[in-house]
Amino acid sequence: MTRPDIVPEHIRKLSPYVPGRSIEEAMEELGLPGAVKLASNENCLGTSPKAIEAMRKALDAGMARYADANATKLKGAIALRWEIRPECIACGNGSSEFILVLAHALLGPGLNAVMSRPSFTLYAKNALAAGAEAREVPLDAGHGHDVKAILSMCDSRTRLVFVDNPLNPTGAFLSRGQVNDLEKALPERALLVLDEAYADFSRERLPDMKELVGRGRTAVLRTFSKLYGLAGIRAAWMAAPQEIAEAVNRARQPFNMNSLAQAGALAALDDIGHVRRTEKTVWDSLDWLAEALGALGLKTFPTQANFLMADSGPFSADELAGELFRKGLIIRSLSSFGFRDKIRITAGLPEENAALVDGIRELLAKNTRSAPGV
Ligand SMILES: Cc1ncc(COP(=O)(O)O)c(C=O)c1O
């Protein structure tokens, strides 16, 4: 007897998340001894050495016990650093977890969430998974969040407004004033979820987290995946009005942040040397890439993140990413984000950037076509 399909339609309609292709995949598929991955906005300098040491120590102590369910030490350190009360902080298994739990806790049928399109794909997906409506708003002409258009899509049934600042995949940035204006004009029952996954790399002044949280309208998401090089261990935190932090703490899994992640994140916060080296490497890398790609005739776009968006020249984005992959150079085509002629490149080490630019130069030299659509 076949069982009737019990998966509801709104779940059946979801597409699985498509991650960037891995170095191992490229090596195996192409038989290459190595590959360069500049596709997932990870830290090109790797994990904070202090975090590695702390995680080794934690591992040596054994993993038989459950983790601290409240990540007390990490929460205390974050509270001290950002001057936010621990009651307003939640720690978790990557900022992806907060996006999921916020949607799970605050959305449902008849309610909606508003987000830009393109922006981080998990916002719309988790709103839909919660049975709510995902209202996607096109970017403005500068490839940034269109604050007016976002506000025009909000109504009394809007509970979450997701804004990644800087914006993935374009690198565009909303100023402190723009964030404040957006927050002020939101409907009373809507919470602004300001996803600051890349804010650490911004060269502009950030919105003041303490003020935002204090005003009671905004939850700020921060991750250890980028600046601290801990994407593989899954660690993040959220600062939010107390009732929102409490709602997330009620709705989340009890041991959502494992012991290794807690130890690694706590040590990484204190590894100022690694943070400073990362910032300098990323900023130098982005400046170098913008200049080198510009010299090849590929336009790049201003960025406040650890990646940049560039035109794919005479190729479609998929063609360029595909050809580069065959050379063991992994970048991201933005066609799935709706940009068929744009790619996203993560800031890499000097030798990685040089290999990528050499690869693009070779492809351009072999190519006789003009730009797509020309
Ligand atoms: C805007 C944005 N938010 C959140 C995430 C996910 O971060 P985490 O690794 O903490 O889940 C990403 C990952 O690429 C991202 O681009």
Image: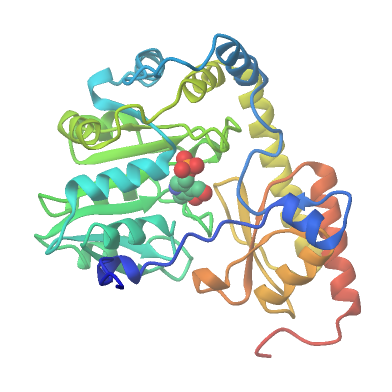
Pick the front one: 175 or 44: 44
**Left or right: 220 with respect to 157?**
right
> Is residue 244 depicted above or below 15 in this figure?
above
Pick the front one: 163 or 337: 337
* Residue 362, percent from left and from top: 90, 69
> Is residue 367 depicted above or below 90 in this figure?
below
Q: Residue at x 81, y 58 (%)?
A: 328
Q: Residue at x 89, y 49 (%)?
A: 33
**Does residue 125 show up?**
yes
Most distant residue in the front direction: 1
Snapshot colouring:
rainbow
**Left or right: 294 with respect to 156?**
right
**Does residue 198 show up?**
no
* Residue 163, percent from left and from top: 35, 52
* Residue 273, percent from left and from top: 65, 19
Q: Residue at x 64, y 24 (%)?
A: 48
- Specify the quadrant of the image occupied by residue 216: top left
> Is residue 302 depicted above or below 272 in this figure?
below
**Quadrant of the rendering where the C terminus is positioned:** bottom right
Pick the front one: 352 or 247: 247
- Specify the quadrant of the image occupied by residue 350: top right
Most distant residue in the bottom direction: 374
**Quadrant of the rendering where the N terminus is positioned:** bottom left
* Residue 295, percent from left and from top: 81, 64
Q: Residue at x 78, y 65 (%)?
A: 324
**Left or right: 194 with respect to 217?**
right
